[in-house]
Amino acid sequence: MDSRLDNAPCGYFSITDAGIIREVNQTLLNMLQHDNPELAGLHVESVLSVTNKLLFHTYFYPHIQLYGQVNEMYMSLRTNSGGDVPVLLNGIRRTRDGESRIDIVVVEMRKRIEHEKDVLQTKVKLQELYQATNEANKRLELLNEEYERKQQELMLINSRLEAMATTDPLTGLRNRRYFQDHLTTLLAKHQDSGQPLSMLIIDIDHFKHINDTYGHPIGDIVLAKLAELLQSMSRETDIIARFGGEEFVAILPETGKEQAVDIAEALCRATAATPMDDYRITISLGVATAEVGETNGTLVKKADTALYASKSGGRNRVTHAGDL
Amino acid sequence: MSIDILQRNHVKVLGSGDQTIVFAHGFGCDQEMWRHIVPAFEQNYRIVLFDYVGSGKSQIDLYDSTKYNDLHGYAQDVLDVMEALELKDTVFVGHSVSGMIGMLASIRNPEYFSRMIMIGSSPRYMNDQPDYFGGFNKSDIDELLEMMQLNFIGWASYLAPIVMQNSDRKELAEELERTFCSRDPHIARQFAEVTFYSDCRSSLEKASVPSLILQCSDDSISPVEVGDYLHAHLKNSKLRQMTAKGHYPQLSHPDEMAQCMKDYLAGV
């Protein structure tokens, strides 16, 4: 053997297809603590532990036979005294003098393999972490879905509650609270835009008499029927509410004095002309149109004053506060 | 359906003859390992080659880690291929763990098989002393798995699929594919575990298809004791000792192996 190969800084040996060692360089002999020429002629298994035999036969051998080359394989060689030398191995299968030979070089990797094992451990830990994170994320997603479902339920319940809180149960109209809130909002809008805004207060004439004569259940029917009529004659933007007792109110956005009076008179006529079940009623109305600096209180007060004028003027009629 | 199976297992059909020989590769290989044997039979037999799902050029996305956590999952591959090709009375040649996979398949559907040929097969690799000698202690197998892990960059790592999908590292993926004949390190590892921790001893007595056990001399994976054990527990089995050494006579001694197969099939 060439002396440079014999003493090259890597172990070199060659084996036959049957696995018999043919040549060994001095570096490998030193590595395995063997004396020349003990190794040549032995089967390669004689320098392999049980595990490494398994690795050699399931990995190295079929691979080099099928593809002619093995690169960067990690395995261990057995020393004469039974110790293991971890090595990095390259092999190539060639035909020389009509016979095929597998040339193998090995480099000791004692320090390197410790590093590799560290890396492997880190990878295993990372994988566990990655899996744990994935599972935690899945649980979070499920929780989030549940949370969203609950929130939807809550919003549905909330809107039902809100409707209940702003609705008059007897007539199905909006209640006084809703009216007050919206009057505030619409007044502010009116101040900003300069668009006119009017309101009506509607009171059933002699309602006490109906109650006293026919009883409260009939009074309730009359209230509900009138509410139905008022609602049916209102525009989409109008807000009709029950103010309390036999009193109703209407907010008429973007409506000036004349139009408001027309609407009021139409309601007054329709009520007188429409039988409420078997009973006929009339209503008195007070109309007010908002002016500069108007507040909830002053507007309602003006409409109330106009209503009072309709009542004292003979009932079944409309009075606008501006005409007083 | 049949087209799916043929693609899934990368099935190749060649040669011509009245009888069909199905060749099944073992762990760490694919159908390439039969290339020196096939020429000796393709004149007189129809030849079927295939890769198990997860190996070679099979459709890797059909790998199911629950199904293939057991040799029965691989046996189903054998039966699927046979059903897809409407085979009957085949000669099944299984190398190493495939001898046992074929044996398990033959218990479930014996009509597909007329003869079995097992090469270097072992019903259990681990020793079960004092009654059974498989050749390996559990610590040897554990160490083997660790060494394979260190040899296989990214094996058992969640990073591996990323490496595989990264086109910059294409040559690495190809190298991994060639090294363990599997494109996915998780699959290769699971196949190794399923193979080396397997125990088929209790199934042997249920097998009825006549078989030939080809035993290499000096096979450190399936030692002579294992061949004797198989012969003693398999009905209608013949044991033939080869002069070939090692675990891959189909690669190292193809002529002798082909002759042994021909002798057996001729009834010698």
Image (cartoon, coloured by chain):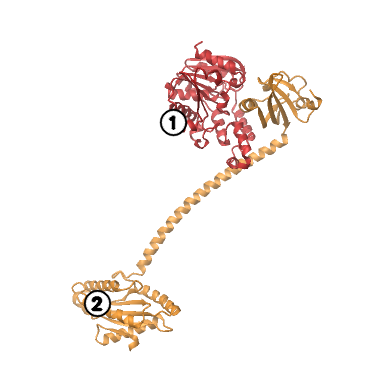
In the image, which lettered chain appears red? B
Q: Residue furthest right?
A: A3
- Chain seen in orange: A
Label 1 marks a residue whose chain is B
Judge whether residue B127 can be spotted in this image. no
Q: Residue at x 24, y 72 (%)?
A: A225
Label 2: which secondary element: helix
Rendered image: mark on residue A249: none
In the image, residue A182 above or below residue B65 = below
Is B182 left or right of A28, judged from the image as shown?
left
Q: Residue furthest bottom?
A: A324
Mark 1, Cα crowd under 10 Å, few <14 / some 14-19 / many 20+, is: some
Instruction: Classify mark 1: helix, strand or loop.
Output: helix
Residue under pointer 1: B2
Quadrant the N terminus of chain B occupies: top left
Q: What's the residue type where badge 1 is placed?
A: Ser
Q: Nearer the viewer, residue A18 or A298?
A: A18
**Chain under label 2?**
A
Give the quarter of the image for residue B111: top left
> For residue B127, what is the image quadrant?
top right
Question: Quick check: A268 left or right of A118?
Answer: left
Residue type at mark 2? Answer: Ala
- Residue depicted at 33% across the width and 88% down the height: A323
**Residue highlighted by disc 2:** A270
Mark 1–mark 2 Cα distance, whole angstroms, equals 81 Å
Label 2, residues with CA under 10 Å away: few <14, some 14-19, many ≥20? some
Q: Which residue: 45% across, 23% down?
A: B106
Q: Position of residue A79 (x, y in %)?
A: 72, 25
Residue B113 in view of the camera: yes
Of circles 1 and 2, the one toward us is 1
The spot of residue A280 in percent (x, y) is 20, 77
- Front residue of A271/A243: it is A271
